[in-house]
Image: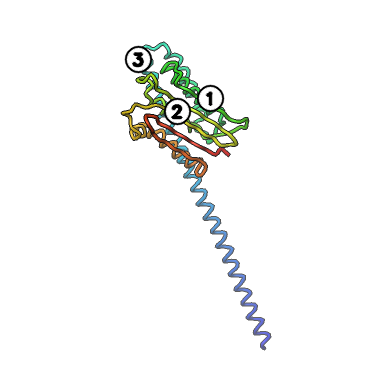
Amino acid sequence: SVSAFLLNRSSDLLVLILKLTALCIAIYKYSLFTLRQTEDLKQEQKLMKLQLLQSQINPHFLFNSLNNIYALVYTKNDIAPDALLKLSDMLRYVTDFGQQEKVSLDKELAYIQNYIDFQILRFGPNEHITYQNQFDSQAYSIAPMLLQPFVENCFTHSDLTTNPEGFVHIRLEVKDAKLVFQTENSIALSHSHQEHQKGSSVGIDNVEQRLHLYYPDEHSLTMEEENGVYKVKLIIDLR
């Protein structure tokens, strides 16, 4: 009969709809599984890259610092023991916190202060070396060893040893979770921007890659040379 035929057709249509629904659910679940695997793989690759970049910090930092200590010892400088103690404090920070994903901003700034004190021991007291930091009372965290390469470059490429008016100025400010870090250092007029960047490539390339991994859309970095002054400005959203 017509009714029986329609009923059978309805049953067949219902079965087809159920099968299609089951297929769609299966495809959706597989897509989620594939997407999750892809995201997990991306996260794992990011972590591996970060670990590689962080592992590069230690030998680069240690090599440069030991060179400084060697120069002091070679010239029989009386400040060599104090410099060695400062280096010991810095190495303790690197080994204890250098491989962590984030550290407190207080710890990072204490490390920066130690590094600057280390350089002042090398160059001697100098009113043209300044460091200022100002931030609100909130507790912030930051990727470790992110600022030190810029500070290191200030001293490495400055003309402090040849120019009585040579200078290094470092300033950091944090307000409402926005970190603004700026450095300025005088350079010899014969020392070009390209030479400065070339000499800084290992540490700065490392920092730039880590910035893109840790703060992909939450930072800006400018580096420029103007009239014998090299300037760096780094802004990071710490939220």
CB contact under 8 Å: marks 1 and 3: no
Q: Quadrant of the C terminus?
A: top right
Q: Position of residue 45 (x, y in %)?
A: 47, 45
Amino acid on which the number 2 mark rests in the picture = Val
Where disc 3 sits, the SS reads helix
Q: Quadrant of the N terminus?
A: bottom right
Q: What label does residue 74 carry, if any?
A: 3
Residue placed most toward the observer, 63 or 17: 63
Where disc 2 sits, the SS reads helix
Q: Residues within 10 Å of mark 3 (few under 14, many from 20)?
A: few
Looking at this rendering, what residue extends furthest in the left direction?
190
Q: Nearer the viewer, mark 2 or mark 3?
A: 2
Residue 52 visible = no
Amino acid on which the number 3 mark rests in the picture = Tyr
Whichever of callouts 2 and 3 sits on the residue coming sooner in the sequence is: 3
Residue under circle 2?
151
Looking at this rendering, what residue extends furthest in the bottom direction?
1
Q: Position of residue 10 (x, y in %)?
A: 65, 79
